[in-house]
Amino acid sequence: MASIFTKIVSGELPCHEVWQDEDHLAFLDIRPVKPGHCLVIPKEEISHITDMPANSHANLWNAVHHVAAKIKAATDCERVVMMVVGWEVPHVHVHLIPTNSAEDIPFPEPCDFDTLDFAEWGRRIKSADPK
């Protein structure tokens, strides 16, 4: 089944487009954190950013960089925060949110973590074999 973003790309659903090229589309988020909050997506439906081929990943970040500059100019914000969460819609998307301070973006609280476990977690990740 096509994702909501695939339906936007095909024109089946509307969006407030702010930019596009042959492979990417940027549009206003319908649930903005701040005015000017946009999403940048590849037009190809790929579930998660880590599933993208390296060249597609690099091209996405070039698009993100371009749209972030447009948002910064339009909103006169201090910074454009970029977030990739990957749970909301099974189609790669990068949130671009204009901000003026760290308080503009909620950040998860740190988990309870024993600092003695850093070495073990470091070893686990270092030795992991991605399939």
Image (spheres, rainbow, N blue to C red):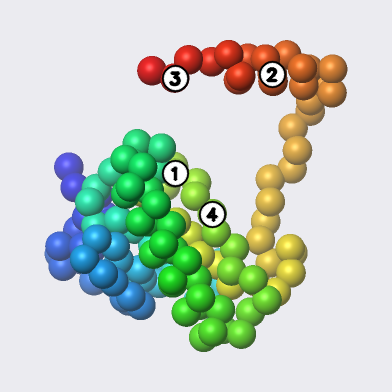
Please state which amino acid type lies under the numbered disc 4: Met
Q: Is residue 47 visible?
A: no
Q: At 77% across and 17% down in the image, what residue appears?
A: 119
Please state which amino acid type lies under the numbered disc 1: Gly
Q: Is residue 122 above or below residue 109?
A: above
Q: What residue is disc 4 on?
A: 83
Label 3 residue SS: loop
Residue 121 marker: 2
Kindly report the distance in space between the C-alpha atoms of the residues bearing marks 3 and 1: 19 Å
Q: What residue is disc 1 on?
A: 86
Q: Dots 3 and 1: beta carbons under 8 Å?
A: no
Label 2 residue SS: helix
Please state which amino acid type lies under the numbered disc 3: Pro
For the residues carrying marks 4 and 3, which lies nearer the camera in this image? 3
Kindly report the distance in space between the C-alpha atoms of the residues bearing marks 4 and 1: 9 Å
Label 1 residue SS: loop
Q: What residue is disc 3 on?
A: 130
